[in-house]
């Protein structure tokens, strides 16, 4: 049976990825320091071929026995998290990536880096293709996450070129689904929790900035396909359907039947004005494209948030 390490396994995406790997007959070691992850995300994996190890990957990683695959997903991923723990965010993108790559080299394992659309910054090219180098402010408050991921991509390619490690890089665009934290700070968790409580739904700026939203099951399917491929260059995985933040807020208010009204707050520094993946590479090289429509994904996510909030 193939054996995989998933760092950040107790996080939103890491937990769904771990579940998919188990479903595909792969033994999983889930590693997380629980800085932003939650054991409740993986408790349903107990009794399967899943072992959890509490460990901070910014320290040396030791895994006894053989290892075939390393998925490096450890990192704070929402703005409220990486603005709260900026140094830890930089360390997991640099030291954590170095240690995870070192482990892959030691075990002769294939390595996949969870990168992000944030490497494109506030883009001047739309939609964003993988050959776009980005427009990132390295000294702004968001730079701790953007530059950590850009560095981790450079480190990954260096290990591939110098040491011959089989590496893959996925650039993840906005993703949503069950197991997102209620207080995550990102648009869908914020809008759902506010609407379910009949509170004001807060959008930043006038809500005209755009996002492209991919359901988590589609995302992890794309990640699995990328790891199984021979594609070394970065690949965007996301839903190319673009909508404004205000449209999203209106759709969630309608879905929940809420009495909430939309109110505006100041736009955060360096907040991207547009975000839309060009997924030509994923379609062509991986045979992948998203299948779950936004309305269906939101309905599934709504049920999860109702349970978390104790709302009928």
Image: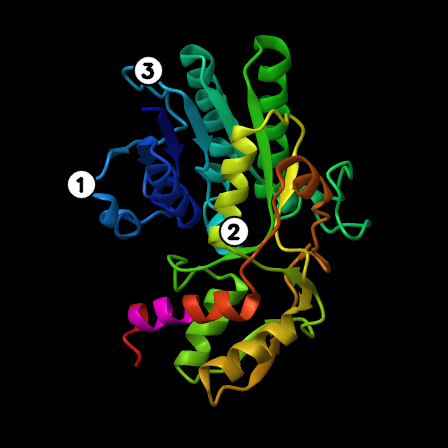
Q: Residue 97 vs residue 3: left or right?
A: right
- The mark closer to the camera, 2 or 3, is 2
- Element class at badge 3: loop
> How far from the left and from the top, in percent, is residue 289?
62, 49
> Observer-nearest residue: 227 or 34?
227
Give me the residue at 63% from left, 61% from top.
268
Of the image marks 1 and 3, the number of the one nearer the N terminus? 1
* Magenta part, dominant SS: helix
Give me the residue at 75% from left, 47% from top.
128
Give me the residue at 54% from left, 71% from top.
295
- Element class at badge 2: helix
Gap in angstroms between the C-alphas marked 1 and 3: 21 Å
- Quarter in which the N terminus is drawn: top left
Q: In the picture, residue 192 is in which quadrant? A: bottom left
Q: Which mark is residue 77?
A: none
Of the image marks 1 and 2, the number of the one nearer the N terminus? 1
Q: Residue 48 vs residue 127: left or right?
A: left
Gap in angstroms between the C-alphas marked 2 and 3: 29 Å
Q: Badge 2 is on which residue?
A: 218
Q: Badge 1 is on which residue?
A: 47
Give me the residue at 69% from left, 56% from top.
272
Q: Confirm or deny contact between disc 1 and disc 3 (CB under 8 A).
A: no
Q: Badge 3 is on which residue?
A: 66
> Observer-nearest residue: 124 or 49?
49
Which residue extends farthest left? Answer: 47
Range of residues picked out in magenta: 302-307
State yes or no: residue 165 in magenta.
Answer: no
Q: Dot 1, how many residues are within 10 Å of its Cα: few (below 14), some (14-19), or many (20+)?
A: few
| Above or below: residue 305 compared with residue 255 | above
């Amino acid at each position: 049976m193939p054996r995989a390490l998933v760092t950040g396994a107790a996080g939103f995406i890491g937990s769904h990825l771990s579940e998919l790997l188990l479903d595909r007959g792969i033994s999983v070691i889930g590693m997380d320091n629980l800085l932003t992850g939650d054991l409740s995300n993986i408790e349903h994996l107990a009794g399967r071929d899943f072992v959890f190890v509490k460990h901070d990957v910014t320290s040396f990683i030791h895994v006894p026995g053989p290892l075939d695959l390393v998925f490096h997903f450890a990192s704070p991923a929402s703005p409220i998290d990486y603005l709260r723990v900026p140094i830890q965010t930089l360390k997991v993108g640099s030291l954590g990536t170095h240690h995870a790559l070192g482990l892959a080299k030691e075990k002769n394992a294939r390595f996949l880096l969870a990168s992000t659309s944030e490497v494109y910054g506030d883009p001047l090219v739309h939609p964003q293709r993988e050959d776009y180098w980005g427009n990132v402010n390295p000294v702004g408050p968001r730079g701790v996450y953007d530059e950590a991921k850009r560095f981790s991509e450079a480190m990954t390619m260096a290990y591939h070129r110098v040491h011959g490690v089989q590496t893959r890089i996925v650039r993840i665009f906005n993703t949503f689904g069950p197991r997102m934290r209620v207080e995550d700070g990102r648009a869908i968790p914020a809008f759902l929790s506010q609407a379910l409580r009949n509170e004001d739904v807060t959008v930043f700026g006038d809500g005209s900035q755009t996002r492209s939203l991919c359901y988590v099951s589609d995302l992890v399917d794309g990640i699995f396909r990328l790891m199984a491929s021979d594609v070394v260059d970065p690949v965007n995985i996301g839903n190319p359907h673009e909508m404004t933040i205000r449209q999203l807020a209106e759709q969630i208010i309608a879905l929940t039947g809420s009495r909430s009204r939309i109110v505006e707050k100041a736009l955060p520094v360096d907040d991207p004005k547009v975000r839309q993946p060009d997924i030509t590479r994923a379609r062509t090289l991986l045979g992948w494209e998203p299948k779950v429509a936004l309305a269906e994904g939101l309905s599934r996510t709504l049920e999860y948030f109702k349970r978390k909030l104790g709302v009928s």
